[in-house]
Image (tube, rainbow, N blue to C red):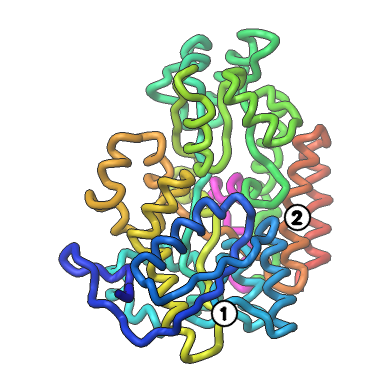
Amino acid sequence: MRFAAAIVLGGALAAPVAGLADELVVHFASPWQIALHQPIADAYMAHNPDVTVTLRPPSQNYEDGAQTIVRQSIAGQLPDVTFAGLSRVRTLAERDIPVPLDGYLGSLEAAVDMGYEPAILDIGRVDDNLYAIPFAISTPVAFFNRSLVEQAGGDPDALPDNWDDILELAANIDALGDDIDGMWHRIGPDDWMAQTLIYSTGSPIMTPDESDIAFDNEAGLYAARMVERFREEGGRRPIPEDAARQQFVAGQLGMFFGTTNLVKRFEEQIGDRFTFGTAPYPLEDRAAGGVPVGGNAAVMLTRDPDQQPLAWDYIQFATGPQGQEIVVLNSGYMAANRLALDPQFLGAFYDENPNWRTSVTQLPIARPWFAWPGDNGVRITQTLGSGFERIAQGEPADATFADTVAEIRSMLP
């Protein structure tokens, strides 16, 4: 039985698709995501026993994954499908490597019927062409230790929604003991959280014509100074993310700001030692602010017209409700397909697990993780992230921000 997997009519799967190729080669970034891709490949092959899905060894991260695909395109060794970092889809599109998916998806109305909301599809567009369909996505959220928040005089059922009150609460938690820290906020190594702070003000990342940076103003200074405030007022120590996660799991960190896909890992590691909660990311401008969507998306690479129907069928399965149920339950990523929220998939699960639902509530304010244009796109991503990381390590916000902006401008096309 072939799947046109995301097409659901009246709650039933659409008719099988016959006559597809019998082997598919898939690449993805980040070794830990084998926990997502192997179950999806197995489920697809179970429904399609005449198809073999081969998973290539993963890349180390999204940047390395994009560079791997670029090298393989030159060598003529591309896989049929890759799952690329959302901020790296543009890198591939500018080199004319992916196959546009607009013709496969059809009209906007058809896409919505398949569970793909316009805001989700916009994340995978480059120059109005759809090159990727989001697969495993996340937004930044707040994780907090309910007991420490309560001990510090806060309300664990209503975490503050603005940074002034959050930093005051963090200072109170920090004062609970020498072995307790108030907060930790992810900064680098990429620019995802730098973009988060900028987007929270309502500012775009570049001007509409992409001729210049759009945040070399109060929005950018706000973001840089906020990192400084995390350090000086919130007690954020300059420790690696792995160490901060361990500290949170040990019950010695009040609040952790990072990706929602940690929710499953935290539940497994914390167990019943204490109770934690999640809350939406604070916005500086609640009317215009937003949060960037991180994660990765399915991209078709094969140019073989006989192979493309199978590649599209697999993409539909992975990004449809069945695949998204596997993604969520095996990671903590949020569902990228609306149909996955139906009762027969994840609806009841989200009702019973509110910590997992928080990120889903932020979809209305989701923004694309901006991909920098030109050959220096990856370097700019790293420059912005490392500039903010230097502030977190102790450098002055205003001067470091000015240096970072100047360096980025020197690398723009």
In the picture, the disc for residue 406 is none
Q: Position of residue 161 (x, y in %)?
A: 46, 31
Residue at 50% over, 58% down: 38
Q: Is residue 72 left or right of residue 133?
A: right
Q: Is residue 207 magenta?
A: yes
Q: Is residue 50 left or right of residue 392?
A: left
Q: Is residue 14 left or right of residue 189?
A: left
Residue at 48% over, 85% down: 307
In the picture, the disc for residue 301 is 1
Q: Position of residue 383 (x, y in %)?
A: 78, 54
Q: Is residue 189 left or right of residue 286?
A: right
Q: Position of residue 170 (x, y in %)?
A: 59, 20
Residue at 31% over, 81% down: 17
Name the one closer to the observer, 181 or 162: 181
Please provide the residue range marked out in magenta. 195-209
Q: Position of residue 93 (x, y in %)?
A: 61, 77
Quadrant for the N terminus in the image: bottom left
Which residue corresponds to mark 2?
382
Q: Is residue 50 visible in this depiction of the protein?
A: yes
Residue at 48% over, 73% down: 52
Q: Is residue 324 magenta?
A: no
Residue located farthest toward the left when viewing the structure as drawn? 10
Q: How many marks?
A: 2
In this rendering, the answer to whether 270 lies above or below 343 is above
Give the secondary structure at mark 2: helix
Name the one closer to the observer, 327 or 177: 327
Q: Is residue 282 visible in this depiction of the protein?
A: no
Q: Earlier in the sequence, mark 1 or mark 2?
A: 1
Q: Amino acid at mark 1?
A: Leu
